Image (cartoon, rainbow, N blue to C red):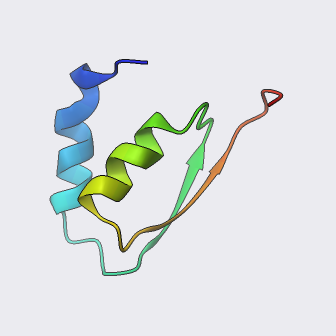
Amino acid sequence: MDLDIYNDTYNTLCSSDIKQNAKVLEIGCGPGNITRFLLKKRPDFKILGIDSAPI
């Protein structure tokens, strides 16, 4: 899934003043594309992704 149009927003989130090892809840994560993007930029994030779709 290509979501490049949102990369500026994700980059802003990653470069903001969010503390190291911040806990992030991603609701409606789908296959985890955003989580993957965020962890590439900020591997210190502790991300929990949830989605109601079956596996």
What is the quadrant of residue 41 in the picture? Answer: bottom left
User: Which residue lies most toward the right here?
Assistant: 54
Query: Which residue: 61% across, 31% down?
Result: 30
Q: How many labels does the image show?
A: 0
Q: Which residue lies furthest to the bottom in this view?
A: 20
Residue 33 position, x and y percent, is 45, 35
From the image, which quarter does the C terminus lie in?
Answer: top right
Q: Position of residue 36 (x, y in %)?
A: 42, 46
At x 55% / y 48%, what residue is drawn? 26
The image shows residue 3, relative to residue 9, as above or below, that is above
Locate residue 2, reporting x and y percent.
Answer: 35, 18
Question: Up-down: is 3 above or below 22?
Answer: above
Res 29 → quadrant: top right
Tell me if 33 is positioned left or right of 51 in this view.
left
Position of residue 47 relative to residue 22, above or below, is above
Look at 83% across and 28% down and name the residue there: 54
- Image-based side of 31 in relation to 8, left or right: right
Could you tell whether 23 is left or right of 42 in the image? right
Residue 19 higher or lower than 7, as above or below:
below
Instruction: Estimate the x, y position of residue 53 in percent, counting from the top left.
Output: 78, 27
Residue at point 23%, 20% (across, down): 5
Q: Quadrant of the N terminus?
A: top left
Left or right? Give the position of 4 relative to 15.
Answer: right
In the image, 31 versus 50, the foreground residue is: 31
